[in-house]
Image: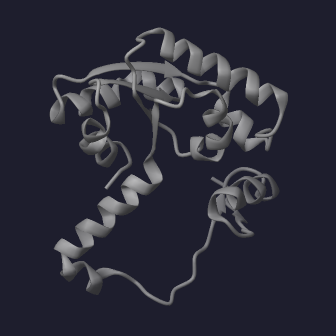
Amino acid sequence: MGVIRPTTEVVGKHSKTGHVGVLGTTGTITSNSYPIEIAKFYPNLIVHQEACPMWVPIVENNEIESAAADIFIEKNLNTLLSKDKNIDTIILGCTHYPLLISKIKKYLPANVKLLSQGDIVAEGLADYLKRHPEMEQKCSKGKTIEFYTTDSPENFDKAASMFYGEAIRSNHLEL
């Protein structure tokens, strides 16, 4: 399914002003993936973007509660919102960013809605599976999950456990 399309399919339903923002990694913002996809569903929406290059390292280095996190989050939000005072909906355009939601909300005006991809993608997948019951036969059940990394397994396990919600033990893979 991907994560961009389900979010862009619904963003217009959340914005009352027709002005939305996207917070993402430098690569995501440079690619213009969100404005391109949003235009397919809501050609009249005005989209502004802001690259947040420090947010992923903040999450991956478990600095979410640090003063540095506050500095970068406040700076990036202020920069995005200064581009258009009518922005009323912001998409979190990176899978790492939901771990920063409590910090983001600290600096987000009350009238601005925050859209996190996780819930939207999960709802889209649930809807897809309801419409395609034949997919159940293709899904594996009762299997185990194995994680492989070319990086340090200890570093990967620590970071991945934050996302997965439980301890992870990965295997090192040489390429």
Q: Position of residue 165 (x, y in %)?
A: 67, 65
| 68 is higher (above) or lower (below) than 64 | above
Q: Is 2 in front, or is 149?
A: 2
The N terminus: image quadrant: bottom left
Evaluate whether residue 143 shows in this view: yes
Q: Position of residue 96 (x, y in %)?
A: 59, 44
107 and 67: which one is in front? Answer: 107
Q: Quadrant of residue 101?
A: top right
Is residue 92 something one can see in this rendering?
no
* Residue closest to the far bottom: 142
Residue 152 vertical placement versus 72 (above, below): below
Identify the residue shown where x is 68% and y is 36%: 103
Relative to 131, is 144 on the left or the right? right
95 horizontally vs 158: left or right: left
- The residue depicted at 25 percent of the width and 33 percent of the height is 37
Q: Position of residue 115 (x, y in %)?
A: 44, 42
Give above or below for 174 relative to 48: below
Q: Is residue 20 depicted above or below 163 in this figure?
A: above
Q: Position of residue 42 (x, y in %)?
A: 18, 31
Residue at 71% x, 61% y is 161
Residue sticking out furthest to the top: 83
Of the pair 41 and 14, the residue shown nearer to us: 14
For the image, the number of numbered tags is 0
Colour treatment of the image: one colour
